[in-house]
Image (cartoon, grey):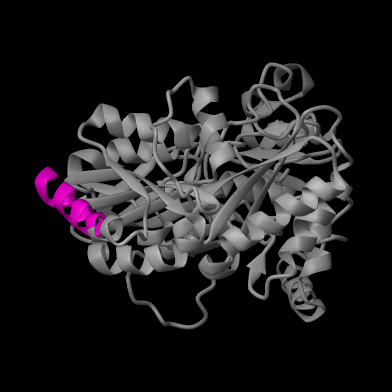
Amino acid sequence: MTLAEILARELGAEHVLGPEKLSLRHPGWCAQSLDAGLLVRPADAAELSAILKATPGVPVVPQGGVTGLVEGTASSPGEIIVSFERMNRIEQIDPAQGVALVGAGVTLAQLDAALEPHGLMAGVDIGARDSCTIGGMVSTNAGGIRVLRYGMMRASVLGLEVVRADGTVLDLTSPLMKNNAGYDLKQVFIGSEGTLGLVTKVALRLFPRPRAIATALVGIDARALSAFMPRLRLALGEGLAALEGMWPDCYRRCAEFQGVTPLPLQAGPDGPGLFLIAEAFGPDDTAAQTALEQALVPMLEDGTIRDAVLAQSGAERARIWRIREGAGVIGGDGAPGYHYDVSLKLADLDPYVQRLQAKVADAFDGIAVLVFGHVGDGNLHLSLMPDGTLPPRDAVDAVVYGVLAGFESSAISAEHGVGLEKRAALQTYRPAGILAAMGTLKAAFDPEGRLNPGKVLPGNGPR
């Protein structure tokens, strides 16, 4: 029997897609997502287990919403793509416990719509909410704009159902807040990018939906960020929900890209400028607006910040966020460029940006360095956009990560993961002992290297 015939025997032919049907599907953000030419759609952990047991040693590539940015869903001929699109049931919402039990294929937007009548929401929120799946968010330990308040995806996961490489199903879906009965195995799979096990179900911690949101656009000298952030946090306490940032070139280009007239803020004529979006949650509109205003006014008066505009309506808030959301798709018009996701200490964010811009200007001609990110948690997103010919990726990587390595506390991936794209950089910039420990973990959970081969670590399967 052919591999496709074996899979059809386990699932039914309608849930095994070959090259003809795959040619009609969009590959998502990774052009190589469908290169395997063979995709299966199991309905639950039992069917996925049966697939793995029926095809021993055959590599499998898990795919959720295919919204990742590091080639983590790339596949090759001879592999099986596992789509979680049929695992899209919200099995339980327990408002008393504050927990939802959902299939890995449930999208974030789908879950949010189901939680709204209960006055609840998931903690993590990302721009791809209409497409990204809960299973994929767990497998990549997704971040987004609310990490400052709710933490990364890991902080919201109470339990998992996982299928191992040999088809063994691990039911770790306990909804309990406290469970110290042995090793916390779910932590191994969160952020492992599908290389240690395949997540099929998630028990997710829920949070109250904010009753009111206040939003301000703030202009600041970027060198004052370390003074601004702790004062904002102390003033707003748990009400501080997000702090996003855009350096001036990015702010202007995103406004133009989105067709929005930029607000005429002063961002620091005496030094590098920075545009911030600060958001606060509150029990009602007046309380939220007042709290954010009272946090910002003293800093305006003493010069810590240069200027600020507090949104007075939902339309004004949407206008502010529309500029920021343009940063996430700045290269989406087909313009060539390279995109990065790095992490540093708050005090090092602007020094890194300034050093990187200077180094890029020395090394290459006509490359714009557009910088934005979740500055409240130290995460920068970089888009390097050329005026003409795009330099080799390796050369640009060496500059971006070489400058980053000059800062004592830094990471080559803040929230996007490693995938194929950052695998070589991981080998260069992570200590050998840590890489060896990762290899030991991989060998223990997937000795044949069949789970998402080639991702994160070299020698991971046939790639």
For the point 26% across and 55% down, which residue is it? 296
Between 400 and 3, the one lying in front of the other is: 400
Between 448 and 168, the one lying in front of the other is: 448
User: Which quadrant of the view contains residue 159?
Assistant: bottom left
For the point 79% across and 57% down, which residue is it? 423
User: Which quadrant of the view contains residue 456?
Assistant: bottom right
Between 412 and 76, the one lying in front of the other is: 412
**Please, what is the dominant secondary structure of the magenta stretch?**
helix
Residue 447 x/y as whole percent = 80, 66
- Residue 405 in view in this figure: yes
Residue 385 x/y as whole percent = 72, 35
Between 311 and 378, the one lying in front of the other is: 311
Pick out the residue farthest to the front.
270
- Assess whether residue 81 is covered by the magenta stretch: no
User: Which quadrant of the view contains residue 115?
Assistant: top left
Q: Is residue 133 left or right of residue 333?
A: left
Residue 337 x/y as whole percent = 74, 35
Q: Is residue 457 above or below residue 361?
A: below
Quarter of the image for the N terminus: give it: top right
Q: How many marks?
A: 0
Residue 92 x/y as whole percent = 30, 48
- Residue 84 in view in this figure: no
- Look at the image and give the residue range highlighted in magenta: 282-297
Q: Is residue 406 left or right of residue 149?
A: right
